[in-house]
Amino acid sequence: MFLDFLYNINLTRDQKNAANQLDKFLYNTDDFLIIQGSAGTGKTFLISKFAGYLKRKNKNFIFLAPTGRAANIISQKSSFNAKTIHSEIYDFMYEKVSVENNEFKVFFEIKNYQIKDTIFIIDESSMISDIDIFNEKLVFGSGKLLSDLITYVFRIGYNNKIIFLGDENQLPPIGSKISPALDKYYIENNFDLKGDKIYLEDIIRQKEDSYILKNANKLKEKIKAKDFLEINFDYSDDFIEKTNFLETYDYFNPVKDIIICSTNKIALEYNKKIRKNYGYKEILEVGDILINTKNSKYFNKPIFNGEFFKVKEIYNHIKDFVYIKNEKAIPVEFHDVILENIENKENINCRIFSNSLFSEKTDIDDLSYQALYVYAIKEIKEKFDIYFEEELLEKIKGNRTFNALHVKYGYAVTAHKAQGGEWDNVFIDAKYYGNYKSKEYFKWLYTSITRAKKIVFIKNIPIKSTIFENVEVNYNFTIKNNIKISYNLIFPDSNLKKVYNEFLNIVSRKDFQIIGNQHFQYQEIYFLKKDKDYLKVQLYYNKNFEVTKIKVMESTSVEKTQEFLSLFSKNRIKAERKIKDNKDNNECIKAYVDGSYDNTLKRYGAGIVIIKKDNNIKKYYTYGEKYLKYRNVAGEIIATLLSFEYAKNENIKCLEIYYDYSGIANWALGLWKTNTELTKFYKEKFEYYKKYIDINFKKVQAHSGDKFNNLADELAKKAVFEKKKFIKYDISF
């Protein structure tokens, strides 16, 4: 039995049930089995193990997926070869060309090949359409992919079965309201087949801490409950609300990042900005990332909609005009290029119809289409003596212009184009073209979020809770050894419970527990605990139950209070992306900073101790006579800024600042107001450096015996009294 094959694996309850159903499916009379599994439920893991089980039992099986990218992903995860559905069921050796409504179309038939006694495992089945696609230049079979798959497997083939694997919480195919391949009744009623559907709902334990999956699960539950009124995401190191995507986007490895938008127009704007940041000036340059937007063919090899490419070489550029009906001049532009397929690394030598690059629609407009065909026919007639339409149809099949790829830039794409793919880091612009409070939008968000393997960056969330959106933070607090605590957690109405839930959602990000509360008119008092420390927190709210002010009344710890207040600071550092691929920069270096001042000499000093990953120690120091009114604080700040400058110049991506003066962290993080010229300058420079460096702050007690803190202090004093400086990289004021 399959479960015996999995004896050493800790399965969820749903996975055990699915394993039993898969076992039964092998031997019962059902034609198909649908496995509906949301993100993180282990459906790919389970089906990969099932494939191994089939191999051991000498059962024939084939992995298929709707796109090349999806096929590559299931192949990597299962360790078995996978193909696209198109490459399996359609015959690309024989095609028919015809003219319909003054447009050329190429038709490919279903293979007339009888495959038998085989289990077809279809991944990403939510993407499989069953409606005619009329506007494609290449027409496959009936134009209905699901119908053609069923025909190939059951009408031409013999004694076969299909397992449809997918997630119905994702977007359905364009033009469909449902994902037909995941709908048991649709398949049974339309194809006279018999089957079953099973569900995976339990998140596997190894992924329970993923905020990507937590938020995807929230959306799934709202889709299930038809609750589309608001979105309250939880944020952490792997799910980050960020306004400026382009300062975090990885320009050195763009194929690991993707920006997802709701429209091609928004995607084009991002693509233009990214290309500008690369310094690209021409419409197409070597290194550009492209996505194919229309099925095409080169040398009997299909190139499918949604495949990503990198430009390796550009060896010809054509710009011309085509006159439609001897009236309107339509500009046409082509590039002859060598492209590398990002998934399989294959190179193709082809022509690109460059008009498509700046189209704000899914594809080019009708006039551009007409111009393309007219130009292709003109090329053929200039090269060959054509007397009959049949000759023209035969020649056009191999014409580079007729088969030119329609592409867009591939740095930012729509969710439908991203579907079936995975990227390390996904940037989601949540601005939507339709109704935000709808199932379609929540599925759009769910699909976008579940494209990420490591980090989601998101902005423009339209219907998030506004309870804490405009809260004013009071940074004054009193430290006490003991706090009198009320351990009651009672809520007289649902609005106050909603305030509590949102407050809990925020404070739990830093592992604070709410252990009690008290109610007053337009005020709530909360008692919080973290480790062995306690806080008494006061919330003021208005008639709409929106929190307007927050204040820590009493606390047993300065550090815990600062940590708590940072949750509500609009200027707090958000978790910047962790650059792990660069082995030289994948760990933080440490910088101990300190300042000193002598009133007699009217001079301050700054000392820095840099500790690199190999424990190599660098010592730097300098003095200054500007900003003297700030005394030793000037030295503390200058030392910190010099550390930032060192990290930036040395291409260090992660820096830990060890400090003993609280202002170093608090001014940077926005916990203290910057009321002076120096603190404003410091805050401004910090915002600049954090674009390049992941900066973390660690407090050490002054004169506590920490040898590196003491060394930084000695260096600062040396700079003051000897009026000497030794620094590698200076900063300008």
Image (spheres, rainbow, N blue to C red):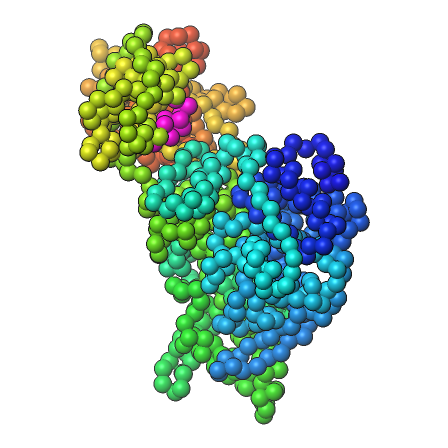
Residue depicted at x 72% and y 33% = 7
Out of 309 and 716, give the one closest to the viewer: 309
Q: Residue 127 vs residue 31: left or right? A: left
Magenta span includes 652: no
Which is the main secondary structure of the residues drawn in magenta? helix
Outermost residue on the bottom side: it is: 387
Q: Which stretch appears magenta?
A: 502-512
Quadrant of the snapshot with the N terminus: top right
Residue depicted at x 58% and y 55% = 184
Q: Position of residue 77 (x, y in %)?
A: 64, 44
Residue depicted at x 37% and y 46% = 228
Quadrant of the snapshot with the C terminus: top left
Quarter of the view holding residue 630: top left
Q: Position of residue 519 (x, y in %)?
A: 25, 21
Q: Position of residue 207 (x, y in %)?
A: 54, 34
Above or below, 500 relative to 153: above
Residue depicted at x 75% and y 50% = 27
